[in-house]
Image (spheres, rainbow, N blue to C red):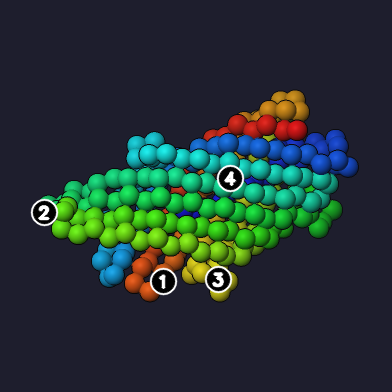
């Protein structure tokens, strides 16, 4: 799920070359906890509010990548993630099995309309897909596939913290009559950039998704630390 990803460049306060395009590619890992309720045909499969599974414990495979192109006040942002998780929840009588393959692809334009170029307005779209396999022992097995496309708007702010270290804050909301009831995405990041080629980042991301269609509902919060290594050119 998701998510969103899609973060500002690391040289907000030290833009020595604003007249030319700069590009960044960053593979990353989001160690996400998955809390909430997934239900199909009126049956709730995740009902414990304390239930969660973590990327490094229950991750089968993952591919996540960000790309940004920036020039002066303008930026084009792309973020994509595909991940598969699986887990079994044992109850007093039955064992519930959950396998989720989720992903998102996001594109947005950022523009700084004010004197300060550190604050940008974001507008774009986020495509999400979800394949869910829900089973109760050998009694029942339900498979659901859903995807949806929503517009998003938001803000992001980044600046120099100390020499070679930068921070960034971002928030956006999606839905607005699209497929999702609502999506809230918030993230904070600290990055280190030395020279003109490599950067490293660590941050925290929170995404809350509420989606319902016919007899299927997906009300889930995903949050956790992410790390990435970027290449600039």
| Residue 227 percent coordinates (x, y) | 54, 35
Label 3, label 1: how far apart the Cα atoms are: 12 Å
Task: Provide the secondary structure element on which disc 3 rests.
Answer: loop
| Residue 193 percent coordinates (x, y) | 69, 29
Q: Residue at x 40, y 45 (%)?
A: 84
Q: Quadrant of the C terminus?
A: top right
Task: Provide the secondary structure element on which disc 4 rests.
Answer: strand
Q: Badge 4: how crowded within 10 Å, few (<14), some, or many (20+)? A: many
Q: Residue at x 29, y 70 (%)?
A: 41
State the residue position of label 1.
Answer: 213
The quadrant in which residue 106 appears is bottom right
User: Mark 3 or mark 1: which comes first in sequence?
Assistant: 3
State the residue position of label 2.
Answer: 93
State the residue position of label 3.
Answer: 178
Label 3, label 4: how far apart the Cα atoms are: 26 Å
Task: Provide the secondary structure element on which disc 1 rests.
Answer: strand
The residue most toward the top is 195
């Amino acid at each position: 799920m998701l998510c969103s990803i899609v973060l500002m460049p690391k040289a907000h306060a030290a833009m020595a070359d604003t007249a030319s395009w700069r590009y960044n590619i960053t593979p990353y890992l989001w160690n996400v906890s998955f809390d909430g309720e997934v239900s199909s045909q009126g049956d709730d499969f995740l009902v414990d509010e304390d239930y969660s599974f973590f990327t490094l414990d229950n991750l089968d495979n993952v591919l996540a990548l960000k790309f940004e192109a920036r020039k002066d006040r303008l930026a084009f942002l792309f973020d994509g993630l595909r991940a598969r998780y699986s887990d079994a929840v044992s109850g007093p009588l039955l064992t519930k099995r959950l396998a989720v393959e989720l992903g998102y692809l996001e594109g947005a334009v950022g523009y700084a309309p004010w004197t300060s170029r550190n604050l940008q307005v974001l507008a774009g779209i986020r495509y999400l897909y979800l394949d869910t396999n829900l089973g109760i022992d050998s009694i029942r097995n339900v498979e659901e596939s859903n995807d949806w496309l929503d517009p998003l708007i938001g803000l992001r702010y980044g600046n120099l913290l100390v020499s070679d270290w930068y921070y960034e804050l971002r928030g956006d909301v999606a839905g607005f009559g699209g497929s999702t009831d609502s999506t809230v995405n918030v993230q904070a990041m600290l990055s280190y950039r030395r020279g003109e080629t490599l950067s490293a980042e660590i941050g925290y991301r929170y995404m809350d998704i509420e989606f319902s269609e016919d007899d299927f509902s997906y009300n889930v919060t995903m949050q956790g630390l992410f790390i990435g290594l970027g290449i600039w050119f």
